[in-house]
Amino acid sequence: MPEGPTIELLYFPECPNWEVAAQRLDEVAEALGVGVVRHIVGTDAEAERVGFRGSPTILIDGRDPFARGDEPVGLSCRVYRTPEGLAGAPTVEQLVAALAPIPHNAALLDRQHRQRVALGLAWATIAWNTVEAVVAIAAGAVASSIALVGFGLDSTVEVMSASVIVWQMTREVPEAREAKALRLIAISFFALAGYVTVQAAIDLLATSEPDTSTVGIVLAAVSLVVMPVLAGLKRRNGRRLGSNSVVADSRQTMLCTYLSAVLLVGLMLNAAVSWWWADPVAALIIAALAFKEGREAWRGEQCCDDDGCAA
């Protein structure tokens, strides 16, 4: 593998924007597998010697990729032109572009691509599950089916889980919110498990008999086709990205597949042979699966559980 570039951050503390530049530069350098050398410039003579065009100045193999030629050399606060306007530090995207000729940069570009894929899949999940939740809860209320209502609530939890990924992936440094994202997803699992368990127990004790729901059967069958595809795409992308939270979200989506199968069996048994108890029993199975996935998400056990996980 080619030797990495020499990246230097020149600054003086009186200009606080160097801290923003340092954070962004560290993110890029970490993805490249290289280090950043920080150097405080203290005198005008030193600024002249190293080509210091204001704080912060970034040098790559001794070259200033952001120099326009009209910046004064000396102890001053530097201003950068960014897509958002004038700023005290270049954006992450500008740093990536500055490092584009470096072979190591392929890893960073691939990572950013996978983050965009994760974001797109999360939005697709939100769209599908919003429709699924409305249909399932409405049909479950009409048929007095706790399993169908529980399935609809799981869809709302899936929306919450995908929203956490959107929240994470739209941040400048998504990895910084990995642990919090996992905890939020775990909480959504626990909330679902608690509600469904209580309501299913009430229905079993009261021998509440649900009506047949053709809409619910069709919905469960369609979900059984759609969700495994979506879950597989999320899981593969999350493992290559090395993101526990994205893989946890894929398991939330895969849980929806299991729930679809359990729900379909319960609804069909109720419709075919009037086994009313199949509905709340199916709901309890849903709750158990949700609790298991929530516990694993809380412990952060989602990503590196096989050789397919990126290091």
Image: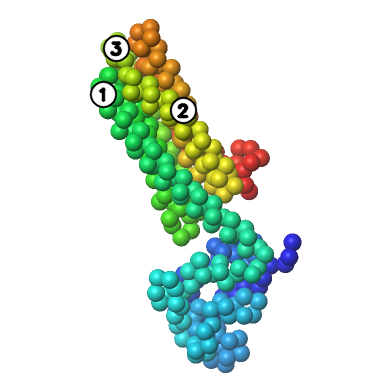
Q: Judge whether residue 277 can be spotted in this image.
A: no
Q: Please tell me which of labels 3 and 2 falls first in the chain.
A: 3
Which residue is at the front of the view, 146 or 202?
146
Give the image location of residue 59, x and y in percent.
59, 77
What's the residue type where badge 2 is placed?
Leu
Reading the image, the residue beneath label 3 is 209
The Cα–Cα distance between marks 1 and 2, rounded to whole angstroms, is 21 Å
**Could you say which disc has been placed on residue 141 in the image?**
1
- Residue at x 46% of width, y 82% of height: 78
CA neighbours of label 1 inside 10 A, class few (<14), some (14 to 19), many (20+): few
* Image quadrant in which you'd find residue 39: bottom right
Mark 1 element type: helix
Give the image location of residue 245, x and y in percent.
49, 44
- Asked whether, in this view, residue 241 is left or right of residue 262, the answer is right
CA neighbours of label 2 inside 10 A, class few (<14), some (14 to 19), many (20+): some
Give the image location of residue 180, x and y in percent.
44, 47
Q: Please tell me which of labels 3 and 1 falls first in the chain.
A: 1
In this picture the colour scheme is rainbow
- Residue at x 54% of width, y 37% of height: 232
Q: For marks 1 and 2, give the one nearer the viewer.
A: 2
Reading the image, the residue beneath label 2 is 224
Mark 2 element type: helix
What's the residue type where badge 1 is placed?
Ala
CA neighbours of label 3 inside 10 A, class few (<14), some (14 to 19), many (20+): many
Q: For marks 3 and 2, give the one nearer the viewer.
A: 2
Give the image location of residue 98, x and y in percent.
57, 72
- Asked whether, in this view, residue 197 is left or right of residue 119, the answer is left
- Residue at x 40% of width, y 12% of height: 269
